Amino acid sequence: MERKEISKSVLKRLPGYLAYLKSIPEGGSPYISATALANALGMGEVQVRKDLAMVCDGGRPKIGYPREVLIDDIEQFLGYDNTTDAVLIGAGKLGQALLGYVGFEAYGLNILAAFDTDPATDRTDDGKPILHIDQLESFCRSHKVLMGIITVPVEHAQSVCDKLIGCGIKAIWTFAPTHLEVPSNILVQHENMATSLAVLSMHLQAQMKEKK
Amino acid sequence: MERKEISKSVLKRLPGYLAYLKSIPEGGSPYISATALANALGMGEVQVRKDLAMVCDGGRPKIGYPREVLIDDIEQFLGYDNTTDAVLIGAGKLGQALLGYVGFEAYGLNILAAFDTDPATDRTDDGKPILHIDQLESFCRSHKVLMGIITVPVEHAQSVCDKLIGCGIKAIWTFAPTHLEVPSNILVQHENMATSLAVLSMHLQAQMKEKK
DNA sequence: TAGATTGTTAATCGATTAACAATC
DNA sequence: TAGATTGTTAATCGATTAACAATC
């Protein structure tokens, strides 16, 4: 499969297709059409077809795409087939929730350990190590970790971010509601609860107004 | 301030401005320019100016916008000035993390209680009630709750969603990685960890390739 | 006054949708 | 063959960026 330049909008829709494809029970047809996928996810069928064209080659007219192949192609495209190791900084409630979430395996994400300035215990319920922040650098170097997850309070986010970059991390997933300043070769993915809440809040405001 | 029709892209950027404006220490100038804001957040200044024009009237040339007024305008626009009550379904780790996060107050969100099919305790550490799912409807009706937060495993997400709608909920914030089927007047906001991971994963793949 | 900054109007860019030809 | 479905090319739409006039 020739790898084309992919836009971010397409990229963001791929996990949705993947999740749906995986959720289909084994029994049925081994093929699925873009039309069927679109209907199931409430999207336009042309869009789905175009998106799929980016990652796989060849559905067959009248039949659709072979489900298994499609799943493999998307996973390979997204890099879910080879796992990424990550460290997590901030072993608070959110941090521990992420640490304990087994579902990330499916996305090729493996959180090796959590770090904190003041580790309450040395292991989570699930047996993942919680280490002192001072051990971060040697840990990252020896495990060749490229991804860091930030779940510390806002005020420490930037300094933790700087520290991660100093440890050789190339991609950062942050849950702290603040802008992080980083060099251009580092990717920051902001899990932005605030924007979600903004969208929800606007919808409710509109609803209230309608009722009047 | 005349309320114009606002696009989703603008809406999603507003919380970022708000967070930054609030983070500025009291001491300095009471004014801030779109240019300064843009630089601080790594954005284009024209975009910032256009976005601000949607929610407030009148910065002053050469001076900028009065910071306090700007904060108030954005908060009012987003509806953060009057709090929204919400219920949360699924008192697992993620659910409890959200339940205990005090930062939501700033977004006008107040999670009243959590519900679960099998409540381990009847209160969280923070003193918020955890109730049995059977009490959901009467609770929502009596408290006139309009927002529901879903933190249950994927396989229960749709049924929980249906239940919430049956209780009169109008907006749903879901953390379950699956598509939810809802009537058109209900808003579903999908907190999509999977898309974030896809973006991160792609970046790391590109990095690896570069190194070779 | 000069210059920084705002707000507006026009141009560009990218993404989505529509139309249609190709194919099994 | 007929019809469902794919893939492609063109048209539309919306959002971002650039250019510029207005203003303090």
Image (tube, coloured by chain):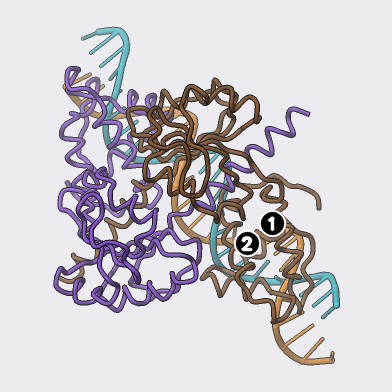
Chain colours: A brown, B purple, C cyan, D orange
The residue lying toward the viewer, choosing from D24 and B70, is B70
Q: Specify the quadrant of the image occupied by residue A32.
A: bottom right
Marks 2 and 1: same chain?
yes
Q: Which residue is mark 1?
A: A74
Q: Tell me whether circle 2 and circle 1 mark residues in contact (CB < 8 Å).
A: yes
Q: Amino acid at mark 1?
A: Ile
Name the residue: 58% across, 71% down: A38
Q: Is residue A76 left or right of residue B79?
A: right
Q: Is residue A106 left or right of residue B76?
A: right
The residue lying toward the viewer, choosing from B5 and B144, is B144
Q: Specify the quadrant of the image occupied by residue A75.
A: bottom right
Name the residue: 31% across, 51% down: A198
Few, some or many residues within 10 Å of mark 1 (<14, 14–19, 20+): many
Name the residue: 54% across, 69% down: A41
The answer to whether residue B162 is above or below residue A189 is below
The spot of residue B152 in percent (x, y) is 41, 64
The residue lying toward the viewer, choosing from A8 and B104, is B104
Image mark 2: chain: A
Instruction: Calculate the distance from the C-alpha at mark 2 to the C-alpha at mark 1.
Output: 7 Å
Q: Is residue B173 left or right of residue A99?
A: left
Q: Earlier in the sequence, mark 2 or mark 1?
A: 2
Few, some or many residues within 10 Å of mark 2 (<14, 14–19, 20+): some
The tally of labels here is 2
The residue lying toward the viewer, choosing from B132 and A154, is B132
Res. B127 in view: yes
The spot of residue A25 in percent (x, y) is 64, 76
Q: Amino acid at mark 2?
A: Leu
Q: Secondary structure at mark 1?
A: helix
The spot of residue A30 in percent (x, y) is 74, 76
Image mark 1: chain: A
Name the residue: 80% across, 49% down: A2
Q: Which residue is mark 2?
A: A18
